[in-house]
Image: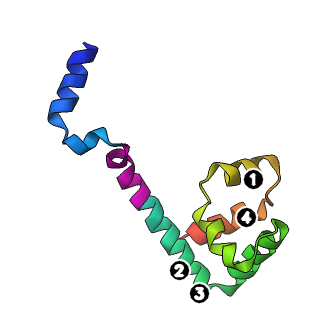
Amino acid sequence: GFFAGVYAIYHTKPLEALDIAYWAKPRAEAELGVEMRMLDKLQVRPDLQERLQVVAKHLKLVDAELYDLVLMRSEYKVLMGLHDGRVPSELKSIYEDLAAE
């Protein structure tokens, strides 16, 4: 049963399917697309930039790291910080505003 399944998958999928990047790539590309739209929106919305700067200052980040905060929105440390209160909850609100169409 199990080995027949592995055999079938091995012979029906391309060889690169054995590489984690093959499975992760579609999701990563979609994520990157969302993040790029968020960064574009940040450029044209000074109000969101200011709100993000306040959060960054609270986290002792410099302005150059604002983009990192957007790109790291799905990272464990950011999510954990939001969950346990080390990161201001305002950041989640900013993420939602940036992600909104």
CB contact under 8 Å: marks 3 and 2:
yes
Magenta residues?
Answer: 20-29
Q: Would residue 64 be found to the left or right of residue 58 on screen?
A: left
- Mark 4 crowdedness (10 Å alpha carbons): few <14, some 14-19, many ≥20: many
Image quadrant where one finds the N terminus: top left
Q: Secondary structure at mark 1?
A: helix
- Per the model, the C-alpha gap separating discs 1 and 3 is 26 Å
Kindly identify the residue that appears in the image at 15 percent across and 32 percent down: 11
Q: Secondary structure at mark 3?
A: helix
Kindly identify the residue that appears in the image at 47 percent across and 60 percent down: 31
Q: Which residue is mark 4?
A: 91
The image shows residue 3 at horizontal and vertical percentages of 24, 16
Q: Which residue is mark 1?
A: 82
Numbered circle sitting on residue 44: 3
Kindly identify the residue that appears in the image at 80 percent across and 46 percent down: 84
Identify the amino acid type marked 2: Asp
- Per the model, the C-alpha gap separating discs 4 and 3 is 18 Å
Q: How is the image coloured?
A: rainbow
The vertical placement of 42 against 85, above or below, is: below
CB contact under 8 Å: marks 1 and 4:
yes
Identify the amino acid type marked 3: Val
The image shows residue 67 at horizontal and vertical percentages of 62, 73
The image shows residue 2 at horizontal and vertical percentages of 28, 16
